[in-house]
Image (spheres, rainbow, N blue to C red):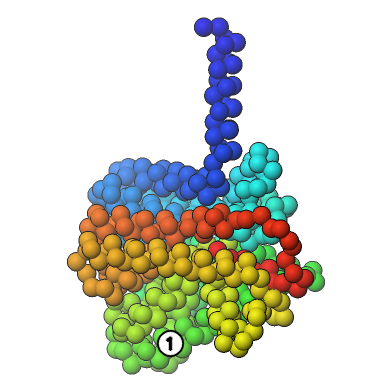
């Protein structure tokens, strides 16, 4: 065969592959990227030099899925089962899972915009928390820079505690947990999360600050960074910040009220100050971070139920966290209040919430609820555990939280598959939902309407 014919055939194959990618819907393309990361992570974690003790392929796969979806549920102890190389692989997977969307979204947007006239890209705009395509590349670079700076500062603060105790490994411990915290991933190297650090605010408060910032969403972080330039906050950012403060305060009061006298949790701490800090930490971590300074398996039933609600709500749109999203829950609540007050349309900060945004919020809430209910039912059919523990496990997986009441380690392969499916769905379902909600606008939004992003 002539060289020219070979080159022509290779060119034709390349064009076919490009056409196939162009015809691939954005959520499918991004799912393919996540699946690729999971596959590579599984292979690396299966290597003998990645393991301190034998870890079979199924457990390596579970770890890879959990890290890439920034969940934190584990079937083997990370610090005991993996070498420094294996821990580094997990750290990279957490970074890819948390920042991967915006890192990969820009080239995908550019490609699809070139081949499809921009019709498919509004999905990615929704998940990134941006109203238009222009400038997303610049924003992506800013987000990566901000993320690296915040994680570096977080690691430096944590190192003040760990380096004097552990030397150079204390540096790595600080870096690993800074990455896990900012990406709301929930992996730890201790084996019992941060239950040994409950009375050490120099560790728990920096961690809480990291996963709260990671959970706000890129749009909010960037707008906060632009306040010095005189630019105000958008309605979305104001609603996100106000809702976050309300949820943090409500969660803290809930944990304090239900666990204050429980000797196995808050009641076992030395003084009121430690109890309040621990209650605040639990309130923040429950909405997707996955770290714990108290044993969630020892908490009272009412605390577990309230924690499940917080896990289902989750973090912000375009953030490293999961869940149904804070603004989604806020819009549904505002619409409910408007209904009982006989208002025709809900509003926030003097801006009307459009019907389109309300329908999107309701769709996100219902779709997420159906996924969780299906997952809980499947776990009940296949696993020998109580309803409360399985419900907690399912919502934790879908919300990419990583907290558990002890059911994770008892799951068989079928149960692990169900939980992995929930973790993956929790990370990518906002992409699919936004894609199916996408519809051409026949008329612009009303003047003064609120631009709030739904995830």
Residue drawn at the location 35% of the way across and 75% of the way down: 195
Residue 132, percent from left and from top: 70, 56
Which residue sits furthest top?
2
Q: Position of residue 220 (x, y in %)?
A: 64, 68
Give 304 or 13, whichever is nearer the viewer. Answer: 13
Is residue 149 visible in this depiction of the protein? no
How many labels sit on residues? 1
Callout 1: helix, strand or loop? helix
How many C-alpha atoms fall within 10 Å of the one at disc 1: few (<14), some, or many (≥20)?
A: some
Observer-nearest residue: 277 or 84?
A: 277
Question: Which residue is painted at 60% across and 49% down in the image?
Answer: 105
Relative to 366, say whether 45 is above or below: above
Query: Does residue 56 show up?
Result: yes
Q: Would residue 99 be found to the left or right of residue 114 on screen?
A: left
Which percent across, then down, holds residue 39? 40, 44
Q: Nearer the viewer, residue 361 or 408?
A: 361
Task: Read off the residue under disc 1.
Answer: 254
Residue drawn at 75 percent across, 73 percent down: 448
Quarter where residue 354 is shown: bottom right
232 in relation to 63, above or below: below
Q: Nearer the viewer, residue 172 or 99?
A: 99
x 59%, y 21%: residue: 11
Query: Quarter of the image containing the C terminus?
Result: bottom right
Name of the residue lying farthest toward the left? 384
């Amino acid at each position: 065969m002539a060289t020219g014919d070979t080159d022509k055939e290779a060119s034709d194959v390349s064009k076919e592959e490009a056409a196939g990618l162009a015809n691939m819907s954005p959520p499918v393309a991004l799912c393919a990227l996540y699946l690729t990361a999971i596959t590579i992570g599984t292979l690396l974690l299966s290597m003998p030099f990645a393991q301190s003790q034998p870890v079979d392929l199924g457990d390596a796969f579970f770890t890879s899925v959990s890290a890439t979806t920034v969940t934190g549920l584990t079937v083997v102890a990370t610090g005991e089962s993996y070498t420094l190389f294996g821990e580094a692989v997990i750290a990279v997977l957490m970074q890819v899972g948390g920042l991967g969307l915006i890192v990969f979204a820009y080239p995908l947007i550019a490609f699809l915009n070139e081949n499809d006239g921009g019709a498919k890209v509004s999905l990615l705009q929704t998940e990134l928390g941006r109203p238009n395509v222009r400038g997303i590349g610049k924003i992506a670079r800013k987000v990566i820079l901000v993320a690296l700076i915040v994680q570096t500062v977080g690691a430096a603060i944590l190192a003040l505690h760990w380096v004097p105790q552990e030397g150079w490994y204390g540096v790595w411990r600080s870096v690993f947990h800074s990455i896990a915290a900012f990406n709301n991933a929930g992996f730890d190297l201790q084996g019992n999360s941060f239950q040994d650090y409950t009375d050490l605010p120099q560790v728990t408060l920096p961690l809480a600050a990291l996963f709260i910032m990671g959970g706000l969403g890129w749009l909010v972080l960037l707008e906060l960074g632009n306040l010095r330039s005189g630019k105000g906050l958008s309605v979305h950012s104001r609603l996100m910040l106000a809702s976050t403060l309300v949820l943090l305060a409500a969660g803290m009061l809930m944990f304090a009220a239900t666990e204050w006298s429980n000797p196995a949790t808050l009641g076992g701490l030395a003084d009121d100050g430690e109890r309040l800090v621990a209650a605040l930490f639990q309130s923040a971590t429950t909405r997707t971070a996955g770290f714990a300074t108290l044993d969630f398996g020892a908490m009272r039933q009412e605390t577990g139920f309230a924690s499940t609600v917080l896990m289902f709500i989750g973090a912000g749109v375009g953030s490293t966290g999961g869940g149904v999203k804070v603004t989604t829950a806020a819009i549904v609540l505002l619409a409910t209040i408007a209904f009982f007050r006989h208002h025709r349309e809900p509003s926030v900060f003097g801006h009307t919430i459009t019907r389109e945004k309300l329908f999107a919020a309701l769709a996100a809430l219902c779709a997420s609820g159906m996924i969780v209910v299906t997952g809980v039912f499947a776990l009940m059919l296949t696993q020998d555990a109580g309803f409360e523990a399985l419900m907690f496990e399912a919502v934790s997986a879908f919300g990419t939280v990583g907290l558990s009441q002890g059911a994770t380690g008892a799951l068989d392969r079928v149960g692990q598959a169900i939980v992995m499916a929930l973790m993956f769905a929790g990370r990518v379902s906002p992409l699919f939902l936004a894609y199916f909600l996408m519809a051409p606008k026949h008329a612009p939004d009303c003047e003064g309407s609120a631009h709030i992003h739904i995830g």
